[in-house]
Amino acid sequence: MSSPKKVYLFEEGHAGMKDLLGGKGANLAEMARIGLPVPPGFIITTEACNAYLNADYLLPPGLMDDVRQSVSQLEGRTGKHFGNAKNPLLLSVRSGAKFSMPGMMETILNLGLNEQTIQGLIAQSGNERFAWDTYRRFVGMFSGVVLGIPKDEFEHRLQQEKKRLGAQLDTDLDAATLKTLTRQYKDLVREKTGQPFPEDPAIQLQMAIEAVFSSWHTPRAVVYRDYHHIDHHLGTAVNVQAMVFGNLGDDSATGVAFTRNPATGENLLYGEYLINAQGEDVVAGIRTPHQVGLMEKEFPECYRQLQQIAHQLEKHYRDIQDMEFTIENNRFYILQTRTGKRTIQAAVKIAVDMVHEGLIPGDEALLRIDANQLPHLLMPTFDPAEKQKSRLLATGINASPGAATGTIVFDADEVVRLAGQGEKVILVRPETSPDDIHGLLRAEGVLTTHGGNTSHAAVVARGLGKACVVGCEALEIDLKTKTMSLDGKILKAGDLISIDGSTGEVFEGRIATMPPSLGPELATLLGWADRHRKMEVWANADTPNDARKALEYGATGIGLCRTEHMFMARERLPIVHDLILAESDADRQQALDKLLPMQREDFKGIFAVMDGHPVTVRLLDPPLHEFLPNYDHLLEEVLRLQDAGRTGPELERKETLLKKVGKLREANPMMGFRGCRVGLLYPDIYNMQMRAIMEAAIDCKQTGTDVRPKIMIPLISDAQELKRLKEQLERIAEDVMHQRGMPVGYRFGTMIETPRAALTAKKVAEFADFFSFGTNDLTQMTYGFSRDDAEEKFLTRYQEQGLLNFNPFESLDTDGVGRLVAMACEEGSLARPGLKLSLCGEHGGEAKSVEFCHQVGLHSVSCSPFRVPVARLAAAQAALKEKSNQGEHLLASV
Ligand code: PEP
Ligand code: MG
């Protein structure tokens, strides 16, 4: 419902008003409400922003009158007056959407200064240097944000002045220089815009409000929202607040602090501050700030207050907070709090710790974690032995964990270009700014010279789960020559480096990585998840190694063992070629006889690892030509040999092969001669596989292994296919058991990968103990999209144009493909009570799809071992959500 009120004083709002007041505004209001030291202010609503944007950049009628009234309230509260030459009130004007978008939109500080009020500020503060520093900052910031003059132009003049005077830091500049700089900035504005810098504070305020509203549409904000799936229609609120100054001298400072470490989750106040500075200096990463722990020495009373407020806010919000604060003449103010963005590592640790601390219940901890992020926790780390051998160039601040190797790139656009060509790159910058967001999104990792743990690069990299090292002061970058020097070594764009975001180390060259394991907190969290979920989680695994990983990550069965990978091994391919090229049954049998013991050993290896757990073996699936050389390459070779006048057995063999490959070529192989179709027309292949499975099972059983094989037929589209194969393969199983004199319990089932199989599930179920939905193929065939062609040619464009709002090969299309799944489950189970239902497409490891699987009553999902934790957690989340929905229904019916 739309609110007629467009402006709220802090004391009129609360934390529940994020839609209207934005996240920052609602939290400022809440902090004011619970009595924290927040400078007074007011919020202009997101509705006012949307009204402005929808009316072609026209402010809603009456808005500025309301703003003026609220400003006079602030005057009453502070005893200062906006625009007053003797005792001026200065304001900060900051954006704040419902969801925090760090640095993506605009902020203007120190608003209200002009040639008269500057005198008042000098008188008020008794500090001329401070006053001119503040005025200089204001003119630079306002001109950049509101008047659209590139910020570099002002920065350039500042750097020139520093160079001329031999000053190291901004703080080394005196009042006279800052005054000159302010004048230079104002001249620059007149030169660039043809207009003088606006002197009237009321006009400054209106222009600033409009600029903040408009910043909702800046390209970087749009990219950020697209990436994080934030609705483009939310709009931003504007927070107008009385300024407090961190640049009043050495008893003033400004900083950012997290209540816990957002990279690791460690329960320790974490952050940094700069003495004699304003907020943007910390975030921009221009000077490398002090660690927050040092405040205990430098500002003991303020440190105590910060600790106490951090504690209070965490208890209040029951989550990690990211706070901005300012110390003005040793007085502590809090300027912002928001839920801290954290890495998935930190998210898991914090959730588990908060349960142990009694802050949140276990169910809430489970629901807080984005299950799809868990694979980041299972990212490889650098192999310590390899690391030892590599040349360490420097160590910076470990801002976001991860091990990344890539070529050096100094420019965000270049990152996008090279990443588009499939290159892995590391973005290296003096510091990053919100304008680099597109490069950060595509880089493997980020390395910066300046900035601390809360600098832009660090915050964004953590949000994206990318490796990041900041504040690497030993790194000297020359953007002109595209080179950098580190530890006396000159590296240029295109050279390889490796960065370890967990330790802050930077190495020359590539370092090999090694697979990770579950940490203690994740193991705890997943243990809780297992108590809630209804579905079993199995894994797609083709080797004993994969099977071991699957068990380690908590799978309790193999839902898909793709046997084709066993045929692809280098030493087996010649035999597979003989099998495919055989002209007679005898030749074919000879090849199969060679493959049989190999397959048997494959299965024995897997059964032994999966002792006591089911193993679902899918019989051969891909088109046969996938095992043969590429037709075009072969043709080229034959022509080359013929042209060279070569004759003899080599050419003859290649010519025969070419003919066979030519015969097997298909216009649309994914819908061609593959899966059960091959099994039916070349029964010996499936027979050999069945024999190998049963023999392996008996061998294992004889040595005491508990074997539970399940035989799965791929790609059926009619019940008759399954019936025929079942009869054929059962005979083989009987034969082996009879020969060996030992029974083995096995199950027989099918994949449901074609729409027709799903549509005729009732008939199919007659011949199946289980169904496993192969949603990769089922998605291709339901949409009529060929996966590889679609992803390469048009799927991204479809998503960009809003024709699809997700990739159906990643997240299950519940409306279409899901409907087939649901129907097949229902009809299959009716026809055959006790029919086991599973899913083994990629979707089995994607959280939303897993939730759907829970809803339609599947008994298990199966996914790659690295995604097993995703499925375990997502299955628990689905069960918990269902429980809470049922609770709501019960309440509603009372
Ligand atoms: C499927 O189609 O979903 C499936 C698991 O089979 P594959 O990916 O091997 O075609
Ligand atoms: Mg398939």
Image (cartoon, grey):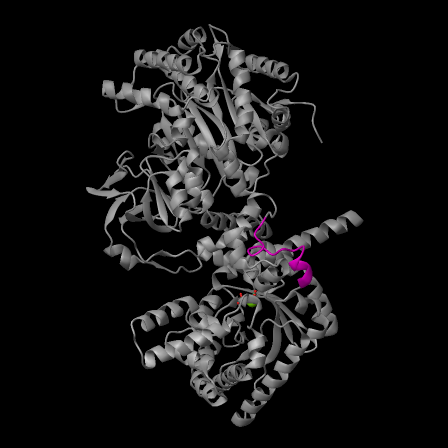
What is the magenta range? 806-821
Please say if 148 is above or below 663: above
Q: Is residue 501 visible?
A: no
Whether residue 376 is in magenta: the answer is no
Please say if 121 is above or below 864: above
Picture quarter with the N terminus: top right
User: Residue placed at 30% from the left, 39% from the top?
Assistant: 472
Locate ligand 1 by image quadrant: bottom right
- Magenta span main SS: loop
In the rendered image, residue 893, in percent from the top left (x then y), is placed at: 80, 49
In the rendered image, residue 79, in percent from the top left (x then y), is placed at: 52, 11
Residue 852 as seen in the image, left or right of residue 287: right
Name the residue furthest left. Answer: 488
Whether residue 817 is in magenta: the answer is yes
792 and 769: which one is in front? 792
Examine the image and state in which quarter residue 378 appears.
Answer: bottom left
User: Residue placed at 45% from the left, 11% from the top?
Assistant: 195
Please say if 569 is above or below 234: below
User: Residue placed at 42% from the left, 81% from the top?
Assistant: 578
User: Residue placed at 56% from the left, 42% from the top?
Assistant: 229
